[in-house]
Amino acid sequence: MPQAAIFVTCLVDLFKPQTGYAAAEVMERHGWEVEVPISQTCCGQFAYNAGHFAEAIKLAQHFIEVFESANASTIVGLSASCTAMVAHEYPELFQREGANMGLASEEVAQWVQRATVMAERLMEFGEWVHGQEALALPAVKPEKVAVHHGCHMRRVLKAMQPTDEALRAYGAELVEYPDETQCCGFGGTYSMIEPTISTQLADAKREALSQAQAAGATSLISGDWGCLLHLSGRMEYEGDRWPVLHVAEWINQREKMSAQKKGE
Amino acid sequence: MERLPHDPRPWPARRDEALHDPVLQATLRRVTHRLNTARIQAYQNYPAGAEARERAKHRKREAVREWEPLLAQAEQQITAHGGQVFRAATPGDVGAYIKKVAQEHGVQRIIKSKSMATEEVQLNAQLEATGFAVRETDLGEYIIQLAHEKPSHILAPAAHKNRQQIQALFRETVADAHDVVSDDIPGLTQFARQKLRQDFLSADMGITGGNFLVAETGTVVVITNEGNADMVTTLPRILISLVGLEKIVQDWDALIDIIQQPALSGVGQRLSSYTTMISGPRGPESWEGPDEWHVVLLDNGRQAIHDGPYQDVLACIRCGACLNVCPVFQQVGGHGYGSVYSGPIGTVISPLIGGMQTFGELPRYLCTVCYACQEACPMDIPLPEQIIGLRSQAVAEDREPAAVRTQYRLWGQAWSTVHGYRRSVQAARIAQRLALRHVGLAAGWLKTRKMPPVAARTFLEGWAHEQRRRRRA
Amino acid sequence: MHEPVDLFTTQWRLLGGEVVLADAAVGWSHTIEDVLAGVIDPAFPTVVGFDTGDWPKDVPWSALCETIGARFYDRHDLDVLSRQEALQDIVAHASVGVTGAAWAAADTGTVALYASAQTSLSASLLPPTHVVLLPKRRIYATLAEGLRAVHAQGAVPHLVKLISGPSMTADIEGQLVVGVHGPRRVVTVIGDW
C-alpha cells in the first residue's frame, strides 16, 4: 500500500479542518495509507515573505525535523504556496541566511542538504490527485466552477495544469473569467500590514469572479486557503454568497456523489 | 543634493490620492493592460525574439558582473572616436559637468529626449537653476514638465492624465492667444509637434540617456518611438549622453541579442520606431551629428549595488514590463511610489539608490509577492526575492515598529515547537471568547474582511483524537 | 516560401508604413513621380533628397519634381548654405524627404541609414513624409544580419539610425498616434535597380 504524509498547513489546521479530512478521505479511497505527523505547525512562509528570516529558519528547521521522522516518503501539501515555500525557498533560505542566523558553515551545508531532500519528497495535492485514476462516474453530471490559482501555484510551482486536469476528470467545467492570472491581494501578512491595497485587489478579483458566477459557476475552488480565506473573508464581509472550496473538498464531494450513484 | 528625489508625503497619503483619482484609475488600467497584452503577443508571434532574450539575459548578467574592464574599454573607444567621457559619482557631479560644458560653448537652449537617469539626478532642475532653458521632447515628458510633475510610468510618463487635462494644461502653459488646442488625442499630439519643432531647430545642446553602451565599439544606443532622440542627436551642436554604468554590454553580438528586448517587453513591438546608435561626434566629412559628444557615466550608488547582494537588479533594461503586470502598480500608478523609479523595479532600486530611510516603505507596503514581475522581466531579475531581501534588511536594521517585531518573534518562538503551537491555539480561542481579535496584525485584516474562528477542534487535534480512539478500539 | 522582400513588406505595413514595389518595365522615374505626387503637400512644395549612390540612375529629379509643382533640393544645392540655414529654411519646410538605405531588415520591418558625407538623416526626420529608395538586394531576412553588416566593415559609422515605421506615440491615454516628431508617412519604394 502506498504511503503519504499530509502536510496540513497551519491555515487548514486552525480554520478549515474539513479540508484536511477531505484530503485524507480521498487519499484513503485511492488506496493510500495516510499519515499525519502530529507535531507539524507552520512552514514559516508568513515570516519569510515579511523578511523575518530568523523566525522563518526556526520554523523551517522544525518542519524538516518533523517530516524527517515520518514513515511515508511522499509528502502531500494542502497548499500550493506552502508547498512552494518548502520546495523552493527552504534550500535557498538556509544557503543565503543560515550563516547570518548563527549556523556554522557545516551546519548550513547540512541544513541545505536536508532541505533539498525534503523538497524532493514533497508534492502539492493537485499534483498528487492528478497522478491517480479519477473515481468519478460519468453519471454524475458536470459542474461549472471557477478556479483561482494562487501566485505561487502559477509562477513558482507552475503546476496549475495537473489540478485543472484532475478537476476536469471529475467533471468540472472550468469557467473562464477576466484577469485570472492576477494576484488576489492576499500576500501573507501583507493582507494585514497593507489592508487597503490588499482589499482593493480582493475586490478586483471579486468583480472578475462575478462574471464567472454570472456564467454559471457554482463555486470557487482553489488549492490555497491563504487566497481563499482572504477572498471569502471579503465576500462574507460584503455579503456575497458563494461556496468557496479547497480542491480536496470538491473532489471528495464528487467521489462521494459517484459512490452514491453507484449504490443506487 | 539627494541621491534620488522623493515625494515627502507618507505612503498612505500617496496611496489614497491615487485610489481616489478616477482619471488615474481608468487610464492606468487601460495603459498597463494594453502594454501587457502587446508584450505577450509579441513574443508568441516571434520566437526569434524569445530566443534572443535567453541569450541576452546571460550576457547582460555577465557584462554587469565584469563591468569595470568593459567600462574602461568603452571609455577608450569613445575617446578614440573623438568623444569625451566623464565619470559622475553623484547627481551634483552630473549637473556641474554639463553646466560647465554648456557655459564653455555659450549654450542657451537645451533639448532632451526621455531618460530615467536624468530624472534620477534631477538634471532639469539643476540646469534651470543656472538659467538654462531645458525642454523635454518626449510627448509624455513634455506634458509632465509643463505640469511640474514626475513621471508616473517608466515608459508612459503621463499615463495618469487624460486628454481633457492635457488640453487644459497646453492652454495654460504653452498655447499662444491665437492657438486652437484640440481636445482629441491626434490634435493634441500635433499641437505638441508644432511647438516642439521650434525648440528642436533652435537648440544648441541635446541631452539623451542611453539604453545600451557597447564596450567593443563605444556606441551609445538610444531607443524611442517618437523620433525625438533622433532630433536630439542629429540637430544640436553639442550632445550629452547620460548613461548609467549598468547600461554596459560587451560587444556588438551582445547588442544584437538585447537590442530588441526593450521594445518587445515594453510595448510589444519587434523594434522601436527609432533606434539611434552614436559612436562618435560628426567627422569633418559628415553633414550631421554633433560637433562635440560627451558621455557622462553615472554611478550614483550603482557601484555599491554592484558590490552587494542585489547585483542582478543592474541587468534591468528599463522596459517597464514589471510595472504593467504588478497588481499594486495597477492600483496606485507611479506616483504612489514617491520615486521616479516605480513598480517592482522601483521598489528595489529606489531604496538601493536613495536609502532605506527614505524608501524602506516601498518593499514593505507595495508588494504582495505575486512573482508576476519576475515572470514578465525579460532579464529574469528575481525582483520578489530582492523585495523580500529588502524587507529582511528593514527587520535587521530595526526599522519595523517594535510591536510588529515582537509579534513575529513570539510567533516564531511559539510555532517552532509543537507545544508552543498548541498553547497559541488555546490562547487564540481565549482571545476569541474575550473578543480580543482586533489587536495586532489581525486588526488590519478585520477592518475589511471576516475571519473564521479557530476551529473548536483543529485538524491536528481531531486527528490525534481519532488515532487514540482507534488504538483503544 | 518567404522572400525577404515579402516579409519586409508585411512587417513595414504592419507598423504603419507604405510599400511601393517598383517595376523596371514601368520605369523608375514614373513610379517615383507617382509616389511623390501622392505625398507632396502643395502648401510646402519642397522635396529634399540625398543620394548615397544607390538610387536608380537617370531619374531627372528636378524636372520630375517640377511636373508635380515642387522644387527639388539635393546635397549639392544645400551645400551652398550653412548647415543651420539648410535645416531651418529648407529641410524643415520640405514636405518630402528622400533617402536611400544602407540596408533593410525583413523580420522587424526596419531600414538603416548611416550619417555620412552624402546623406542627411534630417531628410528622414524633419519632413512629414519620408520616402526610402530601397534596392531589393539590400534587404536582409533578419535584423541580426543587418546589424552584423554594420560592424562587418570594422569601424561602426558615427551615427546609425534604424527606422521601423513612422514616428508614433501612445503617451496620451495609451492611444496610438502616428507622426509625433518624425514623419507620419514612410513610403519605401523597392526595386531591382
Image (cartoon, rainbow, N blue to C red):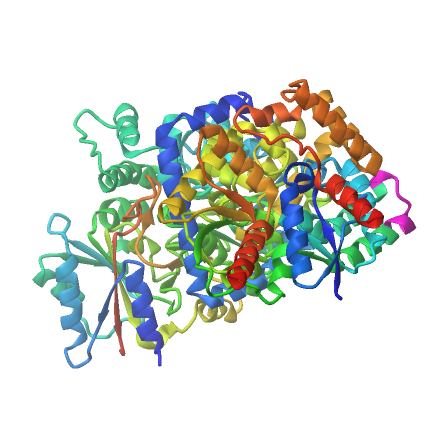
What is the magenta segment's predominant secondary structure? Answer: helix
Q: Write the residue at 47% across / 67% down.
A: B47
Q: Is residue B400 magenta?
A: no
Residue B464 located left or right of residue B15:
right
The percent position of residue A84, horizontal first and vertical second, equals: 67, 51
The percent position of residue B299, horizontal first and vertical second, equals: 63, 40
The percent position of residue B454, horizontal first and vertical second, equals: 67, 32
- Count of numbered marks: 0
Q: State whether residue B320 appears in this view.
A: no
Residue C175 located left or right of residue A240:
left
Residue B142 located left or right of residue A262:
left
Q: Write the residue at 32% across / 39% down.
A: C172
Q: State whether residue A252 appears in this view.
A: yes
Q: Quadrant of residue C160?
A: bottom left
Q: Quadrant of residue C7?
A: bottom left
Q: Which quadrant, please, contains the N terminus of chain B?
A: top right
Q: Write the residue at 44% across / 58% down.
A: A142
Magenta segment boundaries in residue numbering? A100-108
Q: Quadrant of residue B136?
A: top left
In the displayed structure, would residue A128 be above or below residue B440? below
Q: Is residue A106 magenta?
A: yes
In the displayed structure, would residue B9 be above or below residue B409? above
B334, C23: nearer the viewer: B334
